[in-house]
Image (cartoon, grey):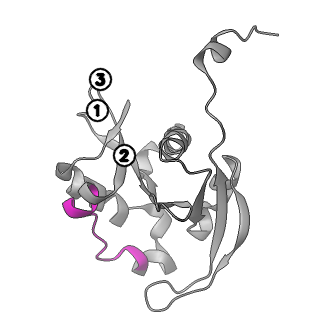
Amino acid sequence: MVIRRGEERDAGRLTRMVRRSGAYEGPYAAMVDGYRVGPDYISAHRVFVAAEGECGDGEVLGFYALMVDPVGPAELDLLFVADRAQGRGIGRLLIEHLRGEARRAGAGRVRIVSHPPAEGFYRSVGARRIGTVPANPPAVAWDRPELSLPVGPEIPVELVLSVEPA
């Protein structure tokens, strides 16, 4: 698996992943009904995909979109892992990649307005809850947790390589 920059040609696959997500069934289905990740969105934002194959040209298993604002915090706009690929650590790999991207963009933290069932995942990767974003019907009919994910300092490769096992 490779994490690579999203390309306009990925738009259809990313849209299908969002619309078919098991996390958005039942009362959450309206949120993704008709949702589109278009080529214009991919070219305008920092979209990265986790794809199978040495060059990342195989099946797309997950993706995220990072919004970087020069005057405010960076923000996670989207993060999805294909239902069939859940539980394989892909979400955690995408979060670590996101941290590196945010750090390179000069951000110290990433704001996350979470889908309520995903809050536990974000907390498990180091995000902490900082508030609640109220519902905004008809687009979003439920309150959502607001979290802050620290980006943290980059660890020099030399330090990582010199760690001795206990």
The residue lying at 40 percent from left, 47 percent from top is 62
- Look at the numbered discs 3 and 2 and tell me whether their residues touch, using CB distance below 8 Å: no
Residue 122 in percent (x, y) is at 63, 54
Q: Residue 21, relative to residue 107: is it above or below?
A: below
The percent coordinates of residue 139 (x first, y second) are 43, 86
Instruction: Say which mark, if any, is on residue 48.
Output: 2
* Pointer 3 or 2: first along the chain: 2
Q: Amino acid at mark 3?
A: Glu
**Residue 52 figure quarter:** top left
Please state the horizontal and vertical placement of residue 68, each as a whole percent of the image.
Answer: 45, 58
Residue ID at (65%, 17%): 160
At x 47% / y 43%, what residue is drawn? 101
Using residue 127 as the reference point, say whether residue 166 is left or right of it: right
What span is in magenta?
31-42
The quadrant the N terminus occupies is top left
Residue 54 - label: 3
| Neighbour tally class for label 2: few under 14, some 14-19, many 20 plus, Cα within 10 Å | many
Q: Is residue 19 above or below residue 4?
A: below
Residue 14, quarter of picture: bottom left
Q: Amino acid at mark 1?
A: Gly
Could you tell which of marks 2 and 1 lies nearer the N-terminus?
2
* Residue ID for mark 1: 56
Q: Which amino acid type corresponds to the residue marked 2 in the rendered image?
A: Phe
Q: Is-magenta flag for residue 39?
A: yes
Mark 1, residues whose alpha carbon is within 10 Å: few (<14), some, or many (≥20)? Answer: some
- The answer to whether 158 appears left or right of 18 in the picture is right
Q: Secondary structure at mark 1?
A: loop
Q: Are marks 3 and 1 in contact (CB under 8 Å)?
A: yes
Inter-mark Cα distance, 2 to 1: 11 Å
